Image (spheres, rainbow, N blue to C red):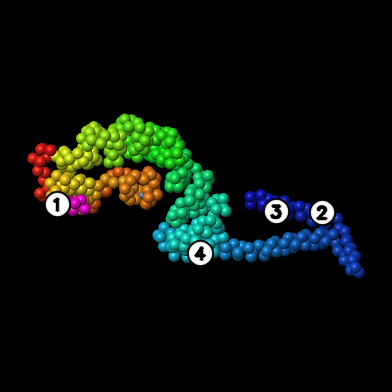
Amino acid sequence: MTLLRTLLWFVLLAVAMIAAVWLAQRPGLVTIQWQGWRLDTSVGVLMVAVVVLCVAAALLYRLWRGLKGAPSSVFDIWGEARRRKGYRALTQGMVAVAAGDGAEAQRQARLAEKLLEEPPLTRLLSAQAAQLAGDRDAAQRYFAAMLDDPHMSFLGLRGLLMQSLKDGDSSKALAYAEQAFQRRPDTPWVVRSLFDMQARAGKWREAQETLQVGLKRKIVEPERGRVLSALLLVERSRAAERGGADQDAMDHAKAAIALAPEREPVVYRYAELLIKRGEGRKAMKAIERAWPAAPHPDLAQLYLAAVADKDPLKRVQALTKLTSNNPDDLDSRIALARECLEARLWGQARRHLETAGAERPDAPTRLCRLMADLEEQEYGDGEKVRRWLARAADSPGDRQWRCRSCGAVHDRWLAVCGSCGAFGTSEWRMPPPTPQAIAAAAATSTLQPGPTQEILPPEPATDAKPPTAAAASS
Ligand SMILES: [Zn+2]
């Protein structure tokens, strides 16, 4: 480059010299007359004067350009420093959000907002900071402002959705989830949120459609999807029945049982409708099939309703048949013991209760209560009754409908948890083990002879041992 430029200079110099020599060889005079002025000079001098003027003009122009450009470069440096400060505030604000320091996050957000004129960047921080500091309205404002920016609108929707969930405003949350789904139907949290909101709002059919999208896009596991579909159908069946559409109710229940014949709410719904139609035998078959996987007192009661026999002995017989596929389960024993008590079969009732573990220190509540009933009915032994009731009160618990998500207990199966709003999380199971129980289990599992006797709660009723003669006689 420089070589080329040097060469160019030489060429120019040569041209200038040739021109000078050419002019020197052809002398001439120039006379300029203007407004009473007169200038006499040679052609050479005039040429040199013209060249000098041109160079001077070029130099002046460059100087002027330089001066004109100078202030902007000063501004540039200043603006750069300002931006750098702004980004630092943004970063520190984000760190404060991560650390949960709402006040600091808000301070940095304000600084960043002032220094950086880039609302998309600072709005998110401002919104999060406001949320963290508990300034609900400000957060709402920032998130809503994001909706106008095509690049930020999705983030804004997410913020508004979370905000309405926090406020417990389900209908607003559903509207935001629908908007988010329209924009990005592939995003897992969008599909999940929309499903949750639809289920919470009792929009079972819509929830089913969303679930299908989730399954197709592999956002929902197939196994979980199968159960959720069946539970949605149970709710659709109920809704149809309430609306007087009995055939639809049955169709949904049938579809549900085809999907998940091992789920208690599904079997219950199907059998309940069959009994209503007078198809008791079919209902019994469905409950018998489900019992090994889903033993439950409500199903036992429904089974007895299908049997439709008032004779207590016949009822015991029916339950013996029902539980024969899963005889050792807690609910099999409890169902049988209850019916034996009704039939005054004390010995059999006692056998079922004891086999189920009424004698164990961690006996479930229902076993203790039934033992109290038994002592009351068979012997009228007030002292034993009192002890069993005391033990029931101390019992670590029993199988109940528990929400897998929040742990809330409900007295019946609920599609949507009344406490946390999750769909399909209700499970019939024992309470989670207490820390004492875990410690006791750990102590028994070690190889050294541990102090297990001290850790286990003492037997409350030592004289509650079965009078075996009475059991045999009944
Ligand atoms: Zn819950």
Mark 3: amino acid: Trp
Give the label, 1 or 4, closer to the camera.
Answer: 1
Amino acid bearing label 2? Trp
State the residue at coordinates (37%, 52%): 419
- Please give the residue where the numbered disc 1 appears in the rendered image: 382
Q: Which residues are magenta?
A: 387-393
Amino acid beneath label 1? Gly
Task: Look at discs 3 and 1 and give the one toward the viewer.
Answer: 1
Tag 3 secondary structure:
helix
Q: On the rendered structure, is 298 left or right of 140?
A: left
Query: Which residue bears the numbered disc 4?
Result: 110
Q: Please name the residue that numbered disc 3 is placed on.
A: 9
Q: Residues within 10 Å of mark 2 (few under 14, many from 20)?
A: few
Decide whether residue 388 is among the magenta residues.
Answer: yes
Image coordinates for residue 73, horizontal then vertical, percent: 61, 62
Label whose residue precedes the other's in the sequence (1 or 4): 4
* Coordinates of residue 280 in the picture (x, y in percent): 32, 32
Mark closest to the chain's N terminus, 2 or 1 = 2
Q: Measure the alpha-carbon separation of dots 3 and 4.
A: 58 Å
Question: What kind of element bears circle 1?
Answer: helix
Upstream in sequence: badge 2 or badge 3: 3
Q: Amino acid at mark 4?
A: Arg
Q: Tell me if mark 3 has few (under 14), some (14-19) or many (20+) residues whose alpha carbon lies within 10 angstroms of its own.
A: few
Which numbered marker is on residue 94?
none
Ligand 1 near label 2 (Cβ, under 8 Å)?
A: no
* Marks 1/4: CA–CA distance: 73 Å
Q: Nearer the viewer, mark 2 or mark 4?
A: 4
Where does label 2 land, which residue? 22
The local secondary structure at tag 2 comes to helix
**What is the x, y in percent for residue 436?**
21, 53
